[in-house]
Amino acid sequence: MRTAVYPGSFDPITLGHLDVLGRAAGVFDRVVVAVLANPRKAPDGAADDRIAAIVEAVAEALPDLASRIEVHSFDGLTVDACRASGARHIVRGLRAVSDFEAELQMAHMNHRLAPDIDTVFFMTAMEYGYLSSSLVKEIARLGGDVSAMVPAGVAARLRASAEGSPRL
Ligand code: PNS
């Protein structure tokens, strides 16, 4: 069984992430979405909430693949999360050339830490190439419509939290 780990902050998951996840599940038998509990930038969503949003989005958008997708949190090295899941591959999405440098560095570093683990990149679909979780959050906070950028449940939660907090 070929297992891959798809690590990230997913704060929150976007349709770009879902696109990469769906395509990874087309290549690997099992994909473990590894949600970094404490990313460098303090997350807006607790790990449990980010996981719940991913599970819900997978059930809605990728029902045929859901049985082969797991979602867990982790809080150490990505390569250790791979070992814990029995994965020999890390999945990452590339949106544009601007992503490449940091991703290349991470892929080399992870390969240095664990030579038996390789990183596989999927080009994010063109229609989602402009998306980022932080931009989505900013737009939602300022009252913009993010329903074409994130799964429906995430859009609803962002809308509710924007309505509940004053726009400064
Ligand atoms: O969604 P993000 O924020 O781009 O994901 C970044 C992530 C989680 C993949 C990266 O920060 C990471 O792998 N963190 C775990 C700690 C680690 O393994 N660091 C060394 C990577 S070279």
Image: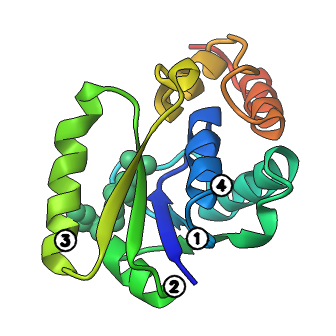
Q: Which mark is residue 103?
A: none
Q: Residue at x 69, y 12 (%)?
A: 143
Residue denoted by label 3: 111
CA distance separating discs 4 and 1:
14 Å
Residue, x 12% and y 74% (percent of image)?
112
Task: List the residue tagged with mark 4.
Answer: 50
Q: Which tag is nearer the camera, tag 2 or tag 4? A: 2
Residue 85 bears which disc, if any?
2
- Distance, label 3 to label 2, CA atoms, is 17 Å
Q: Is residue 139 above or below residue 97?
A: above
Query: For the point 23% across and 59% down, which residue is it?
Result: 107
The amino acid type found where label 3 is placed reads His
Are discs 2 and 4 less than 8 Å apart at CB? no
Q: Position of residue 79 (x, y in %)?
A: 32, 77
Quadrant of the image occupied by residue 39: bottom left
Amino acid type, residue under disc 4 in the picture: Arg
Task: Judge left or right: residue 140 versus residue 122.
Answer: right
Nearer to us: label 4 or label 3: 3
Rendered residue at 68%/61% (across/down) = 51
Is disc 3 placed on a helix, strand or loop?
helix
- Measure the C-alpha gap from mark 2 to mark 4: 19 Å
**Disc on the earlier residue, 1 or 2:** 1
